[in-house]
Amino acid sequence: MSKPSKADLATAVKQARANLTAGLRTPVLTRQRETNQDREAIGSLWVSRVTFSAPAEDDARQIILNAIDILGRGDEQYTHPTTEAVQAQWTGYRAGVSGTEPEPDVSEAEKFGCLMKEVKCPVTILYMYGGAHYINGPAARRGIAMKLAQLTQGRCLIVQHRLAPQSAFPAQPLDVLIAYLSLLYPTPGAYHSPAAASHIVLAGDSSGAQLALSLIQTILTAQKQQASSRPTLRFNGRTVELPLPAGVAMQSPGLDHQGDCLPSWFTNGPYDIFPDVPPCYEPGFPADEAWPTNPPRGSFYCDSSVLCHPLVSPLAAKSWTGAPAMYISIGSTERNSDATRVVAQTAAKQGVAVIWDEYEFLPHVWPMVLKTYPQTLKCYQSWAEACSRFVSGEVINTTGRFTQWDDLKTRKIDVENVTSLSMGEVERLKRSRQRLVRPFTGEQVIKSTL
């Protein structure tokens, strides 16, 4: 394939925006059925479907609720979720088969055993998929998970969290916590052996990265509350520790759930895949049993009173001290790039090792949009390399790299000065925008992102 031109890029982004907008015009339940279907695992990947049972104890849920209370201002309104079983899919690379090889007709346990025969390194990636918390499922990210497993010679576990708007925040962070604990402390009969926290990397794209950092904030808060680097809780009949993972590896993170608060949302609008206002927040959107909600609220994911909470928008987190190393891959023309820059800069200044990997002119989640571009291959290699380095135990230092469009040459970026936005300005802009959000009844534009 010849090198893509800027005209090719503009055409591809325009088409991706049109496709996304069309999907957002679809009734919620219909769109969920379209994007959250399981399907046969064909070709060079192993998939083993698992279900982690809900613990009888309430401790995991209380860890989440305590973090909401401690990190919030006290005026947040949200529904306390039930703790439920969590489905997930082990995903790995399947060598030596054609791209049309069917999924073998054997048990899920046998598929997991076959997957593990391909694993050469201890890297375990806990993957959270994007989709604004309301669409997609593990099958939608198998390709990414397979590539990361192949390049790290490890394995991926894709979490199937509950979907909004039917299940609002904090059901999704709770599901992720249950999956993480189940990796660390499997119940009898589980396919996998206990995974060491030092071998686990949280990974995700878009809103999935938001869930990954929400888990980090939850663990850091539990550490402070219990005055211990390894807080404890009861889980499936025993007292266990809640350690931090080895690292967090994110692609095009969506770290501001409001989205349209910061300048990049407007300056990068013509070059990214997001529409100005998602159709699901416009008059005439086709209603169904899921949306608008009853009673109405201003966001698919949560009540508007929670939009500025760090577990909803990690952009709002004031402290990342003690967090594990982070890898962040971002396109320079993403509408949400300001939020990502603020999080990276704040974390780096507080002593967190941040690997910043920026690509010129590229839009949100470009590896899924521009699959054949050379920048996509480079991104996957860097993403996987970061996961492997986090698990290796080597000392990670903060580094920043900007890859140019024309020749793929790189230059260094000072991650501690990657944005001029201050946390004070960010909070002012977020609170100002939050005050404008009204419950959506289907009759007005609330100009809020997903």
Image: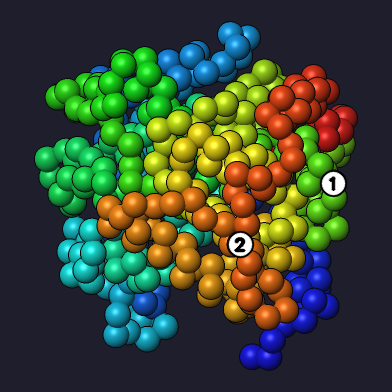
Q: CA distance from mark 1 to mark 2?
A: 26 Å
x 63%, y 57%: residue: 413
The answer to which quarter of the image holds residue 444 is top right
Q: Position of residue 310 (x, y in %)?
A: 57, 27
Q: Position of residue 6 (x, y in %)?
A: 80, 76
Q: Which mark is residue 266?
A: 1
Which one is closest to the eye, mark 1 or mark 2?
A: 2
Above or below — where is 318 with respect to 449?
above
Q: Residues within 10 Å of mark 2 (few under 14, many from 20)?
A: few
Contact between labelled residues 2 and 1, with CB atoms less than 8 Å apart: no
Q: Position of residue 415 (x, y in %)?
A: 59, 49
Q: Is residue 292 visible?
A: no
x 57%, y 72%: residue: 376
Q: How many marks?
A: 2
Q: Secondary structure at mark 2?
A: strand
Query: In the rendered view of the protein, which quadrant contains the C terminus?
Result: top right
x 19%, y 41%: residue: 186
For badge 2, the amino acid type reads Lys
Above or below — where is 147 with respect to 310?
below
Q: Which mark is residue 300?
A: none
Side (left or right) of 222 relative to 117: right
Which comes before the other along the chain, label 1 or label 2? 1
Say which of 243 and 273 sits in front: 243
x 60%, y 44%: residue: 416
Side (left or right) of 160 relative to 403: left
Above or below — where is 444 with respect to 31?
above
Query: In the rendered view of the protein, which quadrant contains the N terminus?
Result: bottom right
Q: Pointer 2: what residue?
A: 412
